[in-house]
Amino acid sequence: MGKRVIVITGGGGFIGGHLAAKFLAAGHEVRCADIKPLDEWYQVHRGAKNFAGAMRGDCRDFKVCRTICRGADEVYQLAADMGGMGFIENNKALCMLSVLTNTHMILAAQEAGVDRFFYASSACVYNADKQKDPNITALKEADAYPALPEDGYGWEKLFSERMCRHFREDFGLHARVARFHNVYGPHGTWEGGREKAPAAICRKVIAAKVSGKHEIEIWGDGTQTRSFMFIDDCTKGIEMITHSDILEPINLGSSELVSINQLVDIAEDIAGIKLERHYKLDAPRGVAGRNSDNTKINQYLNWEPNIRLRDGMERTFNWIYEQFTAKYTAKTAHKSSVSTFTKGSHPIPGDGFNPESKNMKTWKQGIPAGWGGAPVKAPAKTAKKSAKKARARR
Ligand code: NAD
Ligand code: GDD
């Protein structure tokens, strides 16, 4: 394959930044777009054409999508408002709004006649009933249906996956979809509230080491299980799947299952310390167990993500350690756990995920303040005045 023009949305984020590096190194022309201003991108590649910020890089805007897709050969649709459990459980509306980005990017890619459209889906599309036990049977691709995905984020991903399928069937778009299982590595989110467990645990262990306060707060009881995929496996898999004949959504994840307690063991071992563990049982937990069944990817590609968790964690830990110590001291280390986003959503009764929801009596209790309750009335005077003005305009 010769030199290609490649568009990466979410290029200022974790996976997008690594993917751009990979394609630039291979000699391709790369365009990165991200809604964040350039100085907030995790990696800025000078060799790429960078579309940054609300005016040039917001892929909810169809005009932006058209501009970046014009003349492109391949599009990698990674832009999404997302994060770990702390973010997606509390910001379901924001997560669902990524549907605008996905819709406009797929339309623009179709219009530009691209050769390949890659969509980054998630293991959060899988049916919650199949993930109730920490000793989980690994998730097969067929386990997404009947649908009971993660509320908000997972529903949006499942919808957008299906949109890819129908664009392929009805319009001939060469769409490819991978369901990522928890990805980690250097140059990812490690603080602020959107970080996922591997980065969060590294940061907490580092904070304990730097501050000398040998304690750690773990969300849930630590028995919940996950598999974690190192970033290099992720970008390799994306490239292989995009250029394959795999038409249905496919797992892209590690099958090395660990409990969160074991993940903490690994980080402690790398740091060379042992911490007193405190379990925060009311923190966002997500599903009890999740692992990737890699039968299909092995059949199709004769490959599966294979970087050992211990090795990937060591590289991630070292990178976070550098970031952490450049920003915090022993005295300020505790500030690294402050979350910078505000809670938008409330648990929905019966959603199958949030333990809080079980104690709710009516569906209305699940609706964010200001919705479904008594309508917010404008002060009487203002209301009268604006009615008068409106009559005068008519
Ligand atoms: P990330 O948050 O680091 O990167 C996503 C980027 O998208 C961010 O930089 C963000 O600013 C950008 N973005 C958000 N809204 C945008 C918009 N309207 N226009 C342009 N850019 C916008 O996340 P990531 O880990 O790199 O994830 C990339 C993709 O992979 C996402 O679609 C995510 O849902 C998916 N995914 C990631 C994981 C994981 O564990 N990292 C797991 C499953 C799926
Ligand atoms: N984030 C985080 N921070 N999680 C913690 C922490 C902590 O300090 N301590 C323990 N955990 C636990 C969570 O309670 C959860 O049970 C588990 O670690 C994994 O949490 P995350 O890494 O935040 O998310 P996830 O694995 O449930 O889901 C992630 O992966 C999906 C793909 O597999 C999310 O990033 C989704 O957005 C993604 O699609």
Image: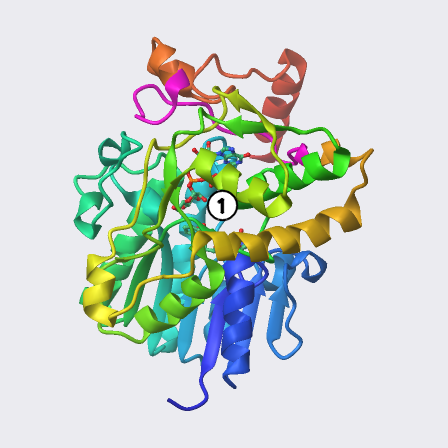
Res 296 quadrant in image: bottom left
Residue occupying the point 34% across, 74% down: 116
**Image quadrant in which the C terminus is located:** top right
Q: Which residue is mark 1?
A: 82
**Left or right side of 208 for 95:** left
Magenta highlight range: 337-356
Q: Could you say where residue 187 lies in the image, as x and y percent from the top left?
A: 60, 58
Residue occupying the point 50% across, 47% down: 81
- Dot 1 surroundings within 10 Å: few (below 14), some, or many (20 or more)? some
Residue occupying the point 48% across, 72% down: 7
Q: Could you say where residue 32 lies in the image, as x and y percent from the top left?
A: 55, 69
**Left or right side of 198 for 176:** left
Q: Is residue 108 above or below residue 139?
A: below
**Image quadrant in which the N terminus is located:** bottom left
- Does the numbered disc 1 mark a residue whose Cβ is under 8 Å from ligand 1? yes
Q: Could you say where residue 22 lies in the image, as x and y percent from the top left?
A: 51, 74
Residue occupying the point 35% across, 55% down: 253
Considering the numbered disc 1 on the image, is that residue within a helix, a strand or a loop?
loop
